[in-house]
Amino acid sequence: MKFKILSASLLAGALSLGTANATEFMSIGTGGPTGVYFQVGNAVCQMVHRNAGEGRKDGRQHGYRCSAPSTAGSIYNIKNIESGELQFGVAQSDWQYHATNGTSKFEGAQVPDLRSVFSVHPEPFQILVGGNTGIKTWEDLEGKTVNIGNPGSGQRGTFEVLLDANGVGTDYFGSATELTSSEQSSALCNGDIDAYGYTVGVPNAGVSQAADGCGATIISLNNDAVAGLVNDNPFYAFATIPTGTYSTIESNVTTFGVKASFVTSAKVDADMVYEVVRAVFENFDAFKSLHPAFANLSPLQMMSEGNSAPLHEGAIKYYKEKGWM
Ligand code: GLU
């Protein structure tokens, strides 16, 4: 019948219009809900959606939609990018390096498809200690109850590296707990733990909660073991947390740190990666304004520092267009 034929062709027309601008979803793995990774992931999504114009005529008609759920952290994100569960993720530069090179926790489990997109803020490794624990140095932690972090988090991995560099294991502590980053500040203030380790951008709401809530402070980590880590590994550097960063920081704290980085897989479509990178850098001031840890970011550093995996081709396309490469 004529009517049926007509509706079939209308339907076909609608379908082909649909595919020209098909909606495609991407997920960005972050970290705990009180961390900075969660802010990074959601800031990226905000820029992707802003760039898409949300129906405005002058918007960019790319059809990508983005979500950035809370996850276990760096190592979880890298593994789930590899399996295709996530398209992007935030990860510490030490774990990006090890996944790319098949070293440390990624020995025998190299991730050859891991690709870097850009690096983000610096992340000092911080050991927070309860205000009335009397802990002032690494040695004082012996026999104490210390949160080493949830499995899959970057800090858990980096804490294990630090223990190893000091020639001890988790039995150096009286007890080692595995709380997530969003649980650890209240545990510290309740006295359930004496200290916790956290690799996180500065400032961080969770750390402030412990500093303001129960006088928690950050100890310096600058013994020979830490100097060795910094000397032997390109992805570690000494870091300073300046006086006044948190209410209890009365003199500069020296520690070591990494960079947060934004990563993806070679299997993710170049067009999707290009649009994400474009959305961030074309709206860079808006992006930077979303968290104080982003204040000092510069595009050229983000493109060139802390990225040990090869850059994704979709990112390279944008950087070349801008004349940055
Ligand atoms: N560096 C932490 C990790 O790799 C996450 C820090 C954050 O959530 O900002 O798991």
Image: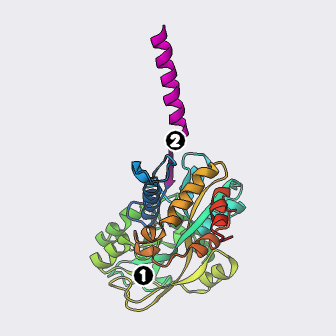
Question: Foreground residue, 216 or 288?
Answer: 288
Local secondary structure at mark 1: strand
Q: Is residue 11 left or right of residue 245?
A: right
Q: Is residue 17 magenta?
A: yes
Local secondary structure at mark 2: loop
Question: Foreground residue, 133 or 294?
Answer: 294
Using the rendered view, name the quadrant where residue 132 is placed: bottom left
Q: Which residue is mark 1?
A: 218
Q: Residue 131's spot in the image, x, y percent?
A: 33, 81
Q: Amino acid at mark 2?
A: Asn
The mark found on residue 70 in the picture is none
Q: Is residue 193 left or right of residue 161?
A: left
Residue range corresponding to the magenta coloring: 1-28
Using the rendered view, name the quadrant where residue 162 is placed: bottom right
Identify which residue is drawn at 44% across, 87% down. Answer: 242
Q: Specify whether residue 285 is in view.
A: yes
Question: Foreground residue, 294 or 89?
Answer: 294
Q: Relative to 112, is 17 above or below? A: above
Identify which residue is drawn at 57% across, 74% down. Answer: 258
Identify which residue is drawn at 49% across, 53% down. Answer: 60
Q: Amino acid at mark 1?
A: Ile
Q: Residue 123's spot in the image, x, y percent?
A: 51, 74
Q: Which residue is mark 2?
A: 21
First reached walking from the N terminus: tag 1 or tag 2? 2
Q: Main secondary structure of the magenta part?
A: helix
Q: Is residue 127 left or right of residue 95?
A: left
Q: Is residue 25 magenta?
A: yes
